């Protein structure tokens, strides 16, 4: 083999190894039960438990938002977010919380929301001739 081919193969192997190490470090979604066992940061996907409500008083403490969330396994847990209540929180379909569990309370450092798409309300059809028709 030529020297340039060997160097090329080594470079490709290093790139593949680097990409694999990046992928291995990504977090997967966990549950409240898993977060209760460890003191590290977790990503938990779930749904806002509307029946239990939420608490946010901007006059008393604008950086404290409390609510209950049900994870994908069905466990409902109290969540405290050290920030303002996200806009359109009530309309969110799904939540992803990033944070840690302490004493049966999940302290979220970030809240990611999946809100209904604005394109679901109005159907749009594009025809072959380039004309666009909207349906309500």
Image: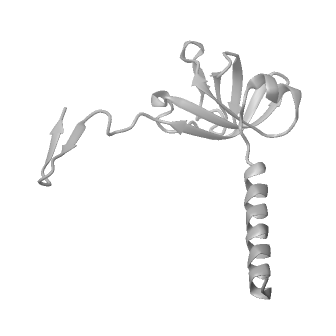
Nearer the observer, 9 or 56 = 9
Q: Would you say 97 lies left or right of 25 here?
A: left
Indicate whether 121 appears above or below 13: above
User: Which residue is drawn at the image coordinates 71% and 39% (left, top)?
Assistant: 28
Could you say which quadrant of the image residue 66 lies in? Answer: top right
> Residue 71 at what x, y percent from top left?
66, 23
On the rendered image, what quadrant is the C terminus found in? top left
Indicate whether 134 appears above or below 77: below
Could you say which quadrant of the image residue 133 lies in? Answer: top left
> Residue 65 at what x, y percent from top left?
64, 32
User: Which residue is drawn at the image coordinates 20% and 42% (left, top)?
Assistant: 125
Number of labels in the image equals: 0
> Residue 39 at what x, y percent from top left?
88, 35
Indicate whether 79 appears above or below 7: above
> Residue 129 at what x, y percent from top left?
11, 54
Nearer the observer, 17 or 58 = 17
Residue that extends furthest to the right in the rendered view of this protein: 38
User: Which residue is drawn at the image coordinates 66% and 39% (left, top)?
Assistant: 63
User: Which residue is drawn at the image coordinates 75% and 86% (left, top)?
Assistant: 4
Nearer the observer, 60 or 84 = 84
Q: Would you say 94 lies left or right of 36 here?
A: left
Residue 25 visible in rendering: no
Indicate whether 129 appears above or below 108: below
Nearer the observer, 12 or 95 = 12
Residue that extends furthest to the bottom in the rendered view of this protein: 3
Q: Would you say 92 lies left or right of 133 here?
A: right
On the rendered image, what quadrant is the N terminus found in? bottom right
Q: How is the image coloured?
A: one colour
Residue that extends furthest to the front in the rendered view of this protein: 1
Residue 15 visible in rendering: yes
């Amino acid at each position: 083999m030529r020297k340039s081919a060997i160097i090329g193969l080594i470079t490709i192997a290093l790139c593949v190894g680097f990409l694999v190490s990046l992928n291995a470090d990504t977090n997967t979604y966990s549950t409240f039960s898993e977060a209760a066992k460890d003191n590290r940061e977790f990503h938990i996907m779930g749904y806002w438990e509307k029946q239990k409500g939420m608490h946010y008083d901007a006059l008393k403490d604008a950086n404290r938002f409390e609510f209950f969330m049900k994870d994908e396994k069905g466990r409902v847990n109290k969540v405290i977010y050290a920030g303002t209540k996200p806009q359109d929180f009530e309309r969110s379909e799904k939540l992803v919380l990033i944070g840690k569990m302490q004493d049966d309370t999940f302290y979220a450092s970030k809240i990611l929301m999946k809100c209904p798409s604005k394109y679901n309300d109005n159907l749009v059809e594009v025809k072959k001739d380039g004309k666009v028709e909207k349906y309500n």
